[in-house]
Amino acid sequence: MTKNEAAFYFVKDINILLEDVILVIFLNKLGVITDMYMEFYEKVEGLARAIGVTTSTVKKYYLLFEEHGYNFKRNQQGQLLFSQDDINLFKELILLKNEKGMTVPKAVKEIIKDKVMTDTTDVTDITATTEDITVISKHVTTVMSELDELKQLVKNQNEIIEKQQEDFKKQFLKQEAYIKDSLEQRDKTLITTLREVQESQKEMATSLSKDQAKKKWWQIWLD
């Protein structure tokens, strides 16, 4: 393997590693977003839709729960926020109150005695209501867009490197063919030259033999 080929595969390995790093970054970003909005909260209107009653009925129900010591979370603006557990609590109330001999206050009291009171600590970072799903979606879309851009960048770099490698191979093969042809031509020229020299030497030797054959014996002796 030549140095250029080694460099090519080294850069390609780096790009593969870069793709893995990009994926890790994406997953980390997505994880941050998921952690931020892991639990969704409904406001009064959302809760009313979820359990199929009016907002005034929801108000009646949550006031009864709070009278019995159950407290719901609120945001910084003082708006009530209902978690999925809270929603399930209201659904349980609707089922229980419809049983024979059961009233809403009795049903609330029955449900509360088996429930752990909700932490009443102010939650200042609760922003994930159903209205914020659009915000979450935008965050995910942004991360996905960034990931696509980075992947496209890596793809473009790989295409450039592959093209350069292909050009290098073509140039290398061309040079190799040129060198091979040059060597073959050199060998042919050398062989031809050697043959010409040998032929010339033979001709000279033959000519010399003929000249010596024409001389008299005493001329050869003198030579």
Image (cartoon, rainbow, N blue to C red):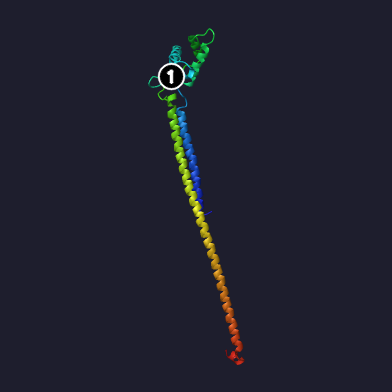
Q: Residue at x 57, y 79 (%)?
A: 201
Q: Residue furthest top?
A: 101
Please say whether residue 114 is visible from this viewpoint: no
Question: How busy is the neighbourhood of tag 1: few (under 14 within 10 Å), some, or many (20 plus)?
Answer: few
Q: Nearer the viewer, residue 145 or 6?
A: 145
Q: Is residue 216 above or below residue 146?
A: below
Q: Position of residue 98 (x, y in %)?
A: 52, 11
Quadrant placement of the C terminus: bottom right
Q: Is residue 98 left or right of residue 45?
A: right
Q: Is residue 30 above or below residue 50?
A: below
Q: Position of residue 143 (x, y in %)?
A: 45, 35
Q: Is residue 140 above or below residue 159?
A: above
Q: Is residue 31 above or below residue 167?
A: above
Q: Nearer the viewer, residue 209 or 222?
A: 209
Q: How many marks?
A: 1
Q: Position of residue 200 (x, y in %)?
A: 57, 78
Residue, disc 1: 45
Q: Residue at x 60, y 87 (%)?
A: 212
Q: Residue at x 53, y 60 (%)?
A: 177
Q: Position of residue 217 (x, y in %)?
A: 62, 91
Q: Residue furthest left?
A: 77
The amino acid type, in three-letter code, at marker 1 is Glu
Which element type, helix, strand or loop, lies under badge 1? Answer: helix
